Amino acid sequence: MVTIAHIYNDFDGKFGIPRQSGLVKGLEGRIVFCPEYRNAEALRGLEGFSHIWLLWDFSRAHNGKWSPTVRPPRLGGNRRMGVWATRSPFRPNNIGLSSVQVLRIETNTPDGPVIHVDGADLMNGTPILDIKPYLPFTDSHPEATSGWTEETRNAALHVVIPDDVRQHYPLIEPLHWTAIEGILAGDPRPHYQNDPTRVYSFEFMGTTIHFRVDNGTAILCNKGNA
């Protein structure tokens, strides 16, 4: 398989990225094709679709090893599930699958055709292996069950962003605070970590976001007042 494109967004590290696609709105990204695939004809008709599937490479998870069972962080890291029952990156073929919203398509830019998307759960620079249109009449199954993930799907945190702390992040644009609230509400911590005094951090929009979690509330803080 070959890389056809890369996605570029505001996540320069793995920690903090939503655990699934579509969970947090306002996380915009640009899909830029590799030079040999910068052909606008290849996107003809895609403008009629609201969502697309991205097949991508867990490029930071290549270690030549795999295990039949893994420890999902959402289960506290102490329960094993079969790798085929998870979306863990540690699998024989390190392939990811994400459904994202198409915001707009530019066919003539200095980088060739560019697809602007929202809701991706990929790190900045992730290689894209393929793009397919999302078909709601076949790809959506409202009656589907969620297996063991039913235990963790409602684990949202309350989010507090004090005004005085917000001022310590001048590089964050106003429109991106909603995205940050969504990231924190999704609780990026592994569930085996539950120390209310511990300060966590993740990279977003070129700055480091600091927070702690106390009794179901994620509280934004700066490094000085942590």
Image: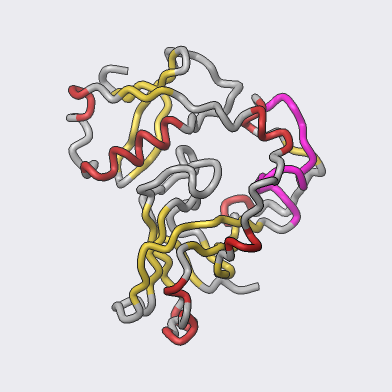
Residue 90 as seen in the image, left or right of residue 126? right
Would you say residue 91 sits in the magenta stretch?
yes
Which residue is located at x 79 percent, y 44 percent?
67
User: Nearest the camera: 141 or 222?
Assistant: 141
Q: Is residue 160 above or below residue 44?
A: above
Find residue 75 and report its image quarter. top right
Left or right, residue 182 beside residue 162: right
Q: Is residue 163 above or below residue 131?
A: above
Q: Where is residue 191 shown, x and y percent of the image?
A: 59, 24
Residue 143 locus on image (x, y percent): 69, 46
Which of the colour schemes (rainbow, by chain, secondary structure, one colour) is used? secondary structure
- Residue lying farthest to the right in this orientation: 68
**Tally of numbered discs:** 0
In which quadrant is the C terminus drawn? top left
Q: Position of residue 225 (x, y in %)?
A: 27, 17
- Say whether residue 114 is left or right of residue 53: left
Q: Quadrant of residue 134?
A: bottom right
Report the magenta stretch's main SS: loop
Q: Horizontal placement of 193 versus 41: left or right?
A: right
Q: Residue at x 43, y 43 (%)?
A: 24
Q: Position of residue 168 (x, y in %)?
A: 20, 30
Give the magenta-colored segment's residue range. Answer: 77-92
* In the rendered image, the vertical position of residue 105 relative to residue 186, given as above or below: below
Tell me, yes or no, whether the highlighted magenta stretch contains residue 4. no
Q: Residue at coordinates 35% horizontally, 43% vertically from top-left?
A: 204
Quadrant of the drawing holding the N terminus = bottom right
